[in-house]
Image (cartoon, helix red, strand yellow):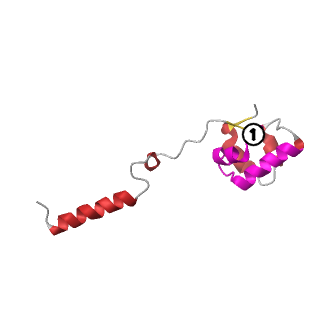
Amino acid sequence: MFNAMTLFKTLTLAVVLALNPWVGSSHALAADPAPAVVNINSADADTLAGALDGVGKSRAREIVRYREAYGPFYSVEDLLEVRGVGQSILNNNRERITLE
């Protein structure tokens, strides 16, 4: 039989668990896996922003604009020509980027 304190603790725990978005989610144990590879010559801005670390929608739009203005990227290092993309972003994403 429940006493008042046990009932209070049980209800409090139930509320905390119900309101916590991490409980019962794979997010609690690991980060969302990013796509293994993204093609910087064909991906749209939303795909680039979602797949590359440090690349938000604005920077992803710059990548697409650069590609549309100057043609395809011939090497991963060509991304350094895009405004807002520096060596750190390139290094953090090098293994995720493909050109074909």
- Give residue 84's position: percent from left, percent from top: 77, 54
Please state if 96 lies on the left or on the right of 27 as rendered: right
- Which residues are the magenta region? 40-69
Q: Which of the 4 quarters of the picture holds residue 35?
A: top right
In the image, farthest residue toward the left: 1
Q: Which of the 4 quarters of the picture holds residue 7?
A: bottom left
- The C terminus sits in image quarter: top right
Residue 58 can be seen, yes or no:
yes
- Give residue 51's position: percent from left, percent from top: 64, 44
The residue at the point 29 percent across, 61 percent down is 13
Per the image, is 88 magenta? no
Please state if 55 lies on the left or on the right of 1 as rendered: right
Per the image, is 47 magenta? yes
Taking depth in this image into account, of 89 and 3 the one nearest to the observer is 3
Q: Is residue 89 above or below residue 12?
A: above
Taking depth in this image into account, of 79 and 56 the one nearest to the observer is 56
Q: Amino acid at mark 1?
A: Ile
The residue at the point 88 percent across, 45 percent down is 69
The residue at the point 69 percent across, 45 percent down is 48
Callout 1: SS: loop
Q: Is residue 67 above or below residue 17?
A: above
Q: Main secondary structure of the magenta part?
A: helix
The residue carrying pointer 1 sits among few (fewer than 14), some (14 to 19) or many (20 or more) residues within 10 Å by Cα, namely many
Q: In this figure, which residue is indicated by the disc labeled 1?
A: 40
- Give residue 1's position: percent from left, percent from top: 10, 60
Residue 86 can be seen, yes or no:
no
In the image, farthest residue toward the bottom: 4
